[in-house]
Image (cartoon, helix red, strand yellow):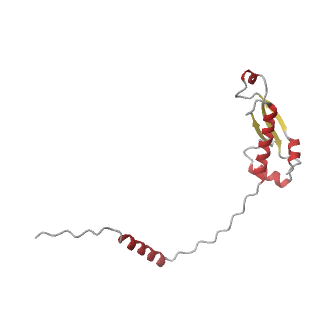
Amino acid sequence: MNTQQIQKELKFRTSRSSGSGGQNVNKVETRVEALFEVATSEGLDEEEKATLRQKLANRISKEGLLSTSSQESRTQQSNRDKAIKKILDLIETALVPEPEREEVPERLVANPKKRKKAKSVQSDKKAGRKKIIPPAKEED
């Protein structure tokens, strides 16, 4: 993954942001949306592109654009920087390989005699903890 190449390939769209800004919010486009076309990127190899398409399928549009947006700041430039950081973080985390799972051995067949013996030992142990209630006296 070549981050400088990816940054060069990013396209940006601006729009009016919601939130703080006072009267400025109605006339200045501070919300920035970063768009990245996965299929035509030269910063990624084919294997990385396939991984991104698989892992970020819900974030990639029908046109093949991966997008993130930022509207936290009052300035367009800081929102642009945040959008770039978001999209690069998204790509980096998607490209981290998943750890291989260890193969689990087949389950061992339990020894029923051993299990029953352990149960009776546990039962005797608990029975020994009970209060001893003397038998009721019979009246003649």
Q: Residue 12: where, in percent of width, then height? A: 83, 35
> Does any portion of residue 40 appear in the rendered image?
no
Q: Residue 134: where, in percent of width, then height? A: 23, 70
What number of labels is visible? 0
Residue at position x 81%, y 39% in the image: 35
Q: Residue furthest top?
A: 23
Residue at position x 12%, y 69% in the image: 139
Q: Residue 136: where, in percent of width, then height? A: 20, 68
> Does any portion of residue 67 appear in the rendered image?
yes
* Quadrant, the C terminus: bottom left
Residue at position x 74%, y 51% in the image: 55
Left or right: where 58 falls relative to 9: left
Q: Quadrant of residue 99?
A: bottom right
Q: Residue furthest bottom?
A: 113
The residue closer to the viewer here, 106 or 118, is 118
Q: Residue 78: where, in percent of width, then height? A: 79, 35
The residue closer to the viewer here, 81 or 7, is 81
Left or right: where 22 falls relative to 37: left
Residue at position x 68%, y 66% in the image: 102
